[in-house]
Amino acid sequence: MERAAAASALLVWLRASGGLVHPALRVGVSPTTGARGLIAAERIEPTPGRPLVAVPETLVLTSASASAAAVAFHGASPRLGPALAVLDPAAPLAVLLALEAAPDVPTPSPWGLYAR
């Protein structure tokens, strides 16, 4: 999937899942760091009580949810996540994102759009 299409799909998924992204924000690449993230496409005036981004707890990628997704969507052993977490708490996330970024993933997890 092309990066622009993947970025658009990511925002559609976030909003459809109950998330909120200010309409002036776009997924883009920082010209100074090269990092992908949200960039303001126009000036945003602060509004009390109106967040720029809101992510439902169900979409937060944790070591536990990454381990569960690796098992459910990629056939990983249920023992993989806890074993990796002993080495580094972020290891299950890294493994899931690597699995999701593979070009031949038949059924990506809900976080597949994030990895692409």
Image (spheres, rainbow, N blue to C red):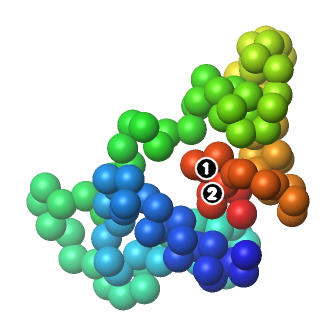
If the image is split into quadrants, where does the C terminus sit? bottom right
Report the number of discs.
Answer: 2
Asked if residue 106 lies left or right of residue 55, the reply is: right
Asked if marks 1 and 2 touch (Cβ < 8 Å), the reply is yes
State the SS at label 2: helix
Q: Nearer the viewer, residue 63 or 5?
A: 5
Neighbour tally class for label 2: few under 14, some 14-19, many 20 plus, Cα within 10 Å: some
Q: Quadrant of residue 12?
A: bottom left
Amino acid type, mark 2: Tyr
Neighbour tally class for label 1: few under 14, some 14-19, many 20 plus, Cα within 10 Å: some
If the image is split into quadrants, where does the N terminus sit? bottom right
Q: Quadrant of residue 46?
A: bottom left
Residue 103: x and y in percent read 86, 62
Depicted 50 relative to depicted 57: above or below: below
Q: Which mark is residue 114?
A: 2
Amino acid type, mark 1: Trp
Q: Can residue 7 be seen in this view?
A: yes
Q: Which of 93 and 50 is in front in this view?
A: 93
The residue carrying mark 1 is 111
Q: Which residue is drawn at 49% across and 39% down?
A: 60
Residue 51: x and y in percent read 25, 58
Depicted 64 relative to depicted 35: above or below: above
In the image as oriented, which residue stretches furthest toward the front? 106
